[in-house]
Amino acid sequence: MAKTSYNRAIQTVYTMWLREMIRFSRSRSRIIGALATPLFFLIILGAGFSSSFQVKGGGSFDKSFLAPGLIGMSVLFASLMGGVSIIWDREFGFLKEILIAPVSRFFVSLGKAMGGVTTAMIQGILIMIIAWIIGVRYQSIWGIFLAIVMMFISGIGFIGLGISIASKIESHEGFQMVMSFLTMPLVLLSGAFFPISNLPSWLKTLVYLNPLTYGVEALRWCLLGNSTIPISICITVLLAFSIAMTALGGKLFGKMRV
Amino acid sequence: MFLNRGESLIYPKIIDPIIMQYAIETTSITKNFDEITAVNRISITVKPGELFGLLGPNGAGKTTLINMLSTMIEPSGGSALVWGHDVVNGSDDVRQNIGVVFQDTTLDDRLTGRENLDLHGRLYGLDGKMRKERIKEVLSLVELTERADAIVKTYSGGMMRRLEIARGLMHHPKVLFLDEPTLGLDPQTRIHIWDYIKLLNKEEGVTILLTTHYMEEADQLCDRIAIIDHGEIVALDTPQALKNMLGGDVITLGFEKSDNIEKLCSSYQKEGCANTVSNNQNEILITVQNGEREIPHILALASGAGISITTVSLRKPTLDDVFIHFTGRAIRDKEVTISEKVSYTKIARRK
């Protein structure tokens, strides 16, 4: 019996993941659109910054500096969207089909999270590859593998956040507002676009309260070999964040009414 | 044969359908939304294999009742057993044994029909071989085999409804809930869907509970009908028995003015030329045996009382007449009472 329920849990997670994958593979324009924004930043800001600024202490301030930040940004966008897409499922009715099934809600939301994080990682990896093509050099092959693990951990966290928000928002009108009030501050306060070593204290507090900061810093450490925040702290914060958000998302989704 | 094949492979059979007395049994089930009582102490029983209809106007509480029976919402009071399992304490067992087709579509319209069925089969624990087999069966039942690999977005309304019925059947449910299965479909498609519903009730032996506000639908399909209004059952019987209750043919009299209609009604009853009389604005509905012979008498009484009749018609009784008889108004009357309106928007907001 215990084996049966274990199999059912795996089957539930896999089913939800499979659905996200089929949908993802059918939306090529969405993938291209999602890649365009970070690429513009990478190419244009990278060229503009490196011709005008230098990091205090001598490091170069160019597309290599920006690449981990932009990978982090696209993982954030993709995973938040993956979580919040539950609002669409509710709007178009499919959520009822899931909620009426004799399966655990927790594993449904976990499957949704796995699907979302897979798409987020695919997008992150694509940006990593494109950045390499335009000249960004990574420190080692192990660093690249570790960076993918970091994308996974932070992606899970932001999907949990997205699912929690989606479970609480009544309509999809509220969604646009939440997204713009959430994503832009998270990206701008993450150190994706500037070094965080010499910030004024008010800004430093906000940056250090932002979970994305630790994601970007961890990626920078993995890919480039240096970071302002030690990698052990980054990993601890990211793990705590993603476990907490998965629990919260699972709990709120469990209480969700159609 | 179908019943046993699916069930025995997935879960051990706990309840033998032969000894089960009722597929659905509710005891004073009640649902309150704030101050509004959407379902008020309803007690019904549905036998295994029965095709049972809930007939009533919008906002009568049909969908709320189905939502409680399908474990989507919890009752505020009373209890219900579906296939022997309590809808609150045994909700997972209830879910494994039921299929639900909701009023609005619940398909993923970016997926193909086959993918929708496959995901459903996975969620209900069907293994790969069984899914493949069952998808073939249900697709041919609703005649969607040829369009199975098209994206659902390209389907017509009728095709989507058929696909949803097919999906509801994937896991061999014992009880199928159909909430307004033909709402918004054109007449031809509606008759098609009726055929499927009858077919699967017979061939798959599945117990069906459907809601509708179409009289013909309830009349055509259901073994028994519960007429529901303001959250309560006002009548429950076979369609024929409900119509027989009125006692004969229906004569409708139209008037220019509604003055003195009440008095005329009581005189018809006194004179014995009417089994039942009900009036609805400027109309009187009379039911009586051998209506053809009673018309002259009825007209004479009216002119004797100085009331001018503008129209007279005679027909066999329909469920519409039954509804008017029990509730005092037609099911399609546009007038909606304030409490109905509130409960309707409540439900709509919850969606």
Image (spheres, rainbow, N blue to C red):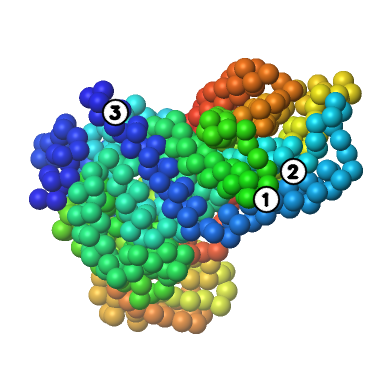
Q: Are marks 2 and 1 in contact (CB under 8 Å)?
A: yes
The answer to whether residue A37 is above or below residue A235 is below
Give the mark nearer the N terminus: 3 vs 2: 3
Q: Nearer the viewer, mark 3 or mark 1?
A: 1
Number of residues whose C-alpha sits closer than 10 Å to that of mark 3, classed few (under 14), some (14–19) or many (20 or more): few
Q: Position of residue B318 (x, y in %)?
A: 33, 68
Q: Are marks 3 and 1 in contact (CB under 8 Å)?
A: no
Q: Position of residue B297 (x, y in %)?
A: 35, 78
How far is disc 2 from disc 1 in space, using C-alphas?
9 Å
Numbered mark located on residue A134 in the image:
1
Quadrant housing residue A29: bottom right
- Which residue was labeled with disc 3? A5
Q: Position of residue A189 (x, y in %)?
A: 78, 32
Q: Type of residue at label 2?
A: Lys
Number of residues whose C-alpha sits closer than 10 Å to that of mark 2, classed few (under 14), some (14–19) or many (20 or more): many
At mark 1, the secondary structure is loop
